[in-house]
Image (cartoon, rainbow, N blue to C red):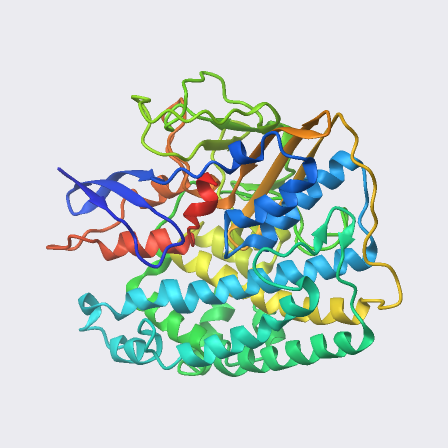
Amino acid sequence: MTRRIIGPFNRVEGDLEVKIEIADGAVREAWVTSPLYRGFEHILRGKPARDALVYAPRICGICSVSQSVAAARAIAAAQELEPMPNGVLAIDLMLAAENVADHLTHFYMFFMPDFCREIYAAEPWHATAVQHFRAVKGDAVPSFLAARAGFLHIMGILAGKWPHTLAIQPGGSTRPVEAQEQVRLSLILAGFRQFLESQVFGDQLEVFAAISSVDELVAWHAAAPARGDIRHFLTIAQSLGLEGLGRAADRFMSYGSFGPDGRRLFAPGTLLAGQRGTVDPARITEDVSHGWMSADTVARHPFEGMTVPDADNPTGYSWCKAPRLNGVTMEVGALARQAIDGQPLALDLVTRGGGNVLSRILARFIEVARLVPAMEAWVRALAPREPFCDTLTIADECEGMGLAEAARGSLGHWVKIRKGYIHNYQIIAPTTWNFSPRDSNDVPGPLEQALAGAPVRSGESDPVAVQHIVRSFDPCMVCTVH
């Protein structure tokens, strides 16, 4: 039995280390470490309440809109303020644009380059993978980057800038859309759809979104195996058996996303042992027993949460806390969202193989295929002559919770306001859920569970299976410990 530290990981937002224990050619146990402490929860204390709208987006440059949305919703809840319908549409368009861009960036820039490694040189698909997906130089990369840049002009129109917009407010969006801008948004989406259908999917978005089972997916792939980058990935996944790699505990959670409360495009809930349930935010806690935090024997709800760093905690091995729902770990992300919403292919993937490398990647594409048509409808629904934002005064004594779904999963902000200033601010990011350390019962977090059993090839110092599993969660470590 040997132990090895993998890291720092390249092509990851922030710092990450994974310690693995290897026995009989496989990972026996894993410990996931977030080695960078940032302290945004401390920075926000004592600030005027609306300052959260300035500071929180700067937690991350990749998913800053998600942070803005969660912060705005937390303050809106504290104000008891409902955003304007136009504002809901505009914010949903911004959030969807960021999530779609994140999913595709993850695929082309972070995930697929691993299949160009020399360890796969004997595979029949390797030469094609190198040609298409080699980091920076693959021929699929320039067209993707150009399409992404054009797509993100949506942010310029709706947000004024990206990242770190201030257009997103508790009462909606401060950036109203004119009629001619509405037409331009439609044209941007039409051009982006053309890129997706020609290069990424090799088919119409609606056709892919309508695939309802793994068997249908296999038939769709076999009908034109060289058409579209998703089919290239499916060829690789089939060859390497990625459906059997990286399974965790199959407990999924989503806060729901897009649209007003009660009418979400993606429904909120949980999925445990194939049974869908509801999410009760009051049952969320954070355990710090294995974090570099001051000793606290109580797993606390975020409204009562404390962030007191202590690098000398003898049981700590990460700056990440251990969030739990009803006392258990939860996997969050696109797979959780789609399966909980009842999307047939996502449900079939989970039923057959749970959360694994293949199902996590495919769920992102299911989401893209569903989101872009929805964005087209939201643009048409905008009413340029109607207001986009409302305002109310923030009470001196109040508190609020803001829940959102970032590309990587469930994001929550909890704020307590006293005498008009932030008394406490706690954040649980998607990667905090997925890259959680052990809790006081010594239960590993989702990634730690998923790494157990990963094969280690003879002579590997940097096991490629570990890389695939880690990247299937698309970690954003700067959000993890914010």
User: Please, which residue is most extreme toward the right here?
Assistant: 385
Relative to the observer, which residue lies in front, 287 or 422?
Answer: 422
Quarter residue 178 falls in: bottom right
Percent across and percent down for residue 189 are 65, 76
User: Please, which residue is most extreme toward the top here?
Assistant: 297
User: Please, which residue is most extreme toward the left here?
Assistant: 459
* Residue found at x 43% / y 40%: 249
Q: Is residue 256 placed above or below 193 in the rendered structure?
A: above
* Residue found at x 72% / y 49%: 169
On the rendered structure, is 245 left or right of 69?
left
Q: Is residue 264 placed above or below 216 in the rendered structure?
A: above
Q: Quadrant of the N terminus?
A: top left
Percent across and percent down for residue 228 are 45, 79
Relative to the observer, which residue lies in front, 291 or 226?
Answer: 291
On the rendered structure, is 351 left or right of 318?
right
> Is any part of residue 18 visible from this angle?
yes
Relative to the observer, which residue lies in front, 330 or 354?
Answer: 330
> Is any part of residue 250 visible from this angle?
no
Total numbered circles = 0
Percent across and percent down for residue 151 are 59, 73
* Residue found at x 52% / y 42%: 429
Quarter residue 86 falls in: bottom right
Percent across and percent down for residue 233 are 39, 70
Quarter residue 285 falls in: top right
On the rendered structure, is 342 left or right of 436?
right
